[in-house]
Amino acid sequence: MVNKISHLGIAVKDLDAVVKMYEEMLGVKASGFEEVEEQKVKVAFLPVGETRMEFLQSTSPDGPIARYIEKKGEGIQHIAFEVDDLEAELQRLKESGVRLIDETPRKGAGGHQIAFVHPKSTNGILIELCDKGGH
């Protein structure tokens, strides 16, 4: 069961510059920077009410964010939803015929467990599911 939108993932080329711009524009402070080696990405979260903006900069030219920016440019890359039980939700989706990128959870930012639903099952939107309290 989905609880809420956890965050919006936004692909950027220059994490420091974008975070500074949004901090000044929105009057909020980033909750820190983190590198997620498994995903070849450096991230920063900006809190906005009960959700967050997650800015993602690739740490490798062959990383998924670099490839995304090369194809589509900077911008919203995914929407993340918090779920009560990530493994049960993945099983439910799989049984209902939803195409998954991840059939089992993997490590995301902050050490939280995440999994992605394939955009071909969601009208072109990359959906991330994250464990309760994720990010």
Image (cartoon, rainbow, N blue to C red):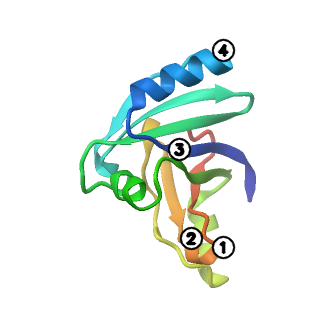
Q: Which residue is mark 2?
A: 119
Find residue 66 and report its horizontal and vertical position in percent: 34, 52
| Front position in the image: 75 or 84 | 75
- Callout 2 secondary element: helix
Q: Amino acid at mark 2?
A: Pro
- Quarter occupied by the C terminus: top right
Find residue 59 and report its horizontal and vertical position in percent: 27, 42
Lower sequence index among marks 4 and 3: 3
Q: CA gap, disc 4 to disc 1?
A: 34 Å
Q: CA gap, disc 4 to disc 3?
A: 18 Å
- Callout 4 secondary element: loop
How many marks do you count on the picture?
A: 4
Disc marking residue 123? 1
Q: In percent of the image, x 41 and y 62: which residue is there?
A: 71
Lower sequence index among marks 3 and 2: 3
Q: CA gap, disc 2 to disc 4?
A: 33 Å
Image height of 128 relative to 5, above or below: below
Q: Are marks 1 and 2 in contact (CB under 8 Å)?
A: yes
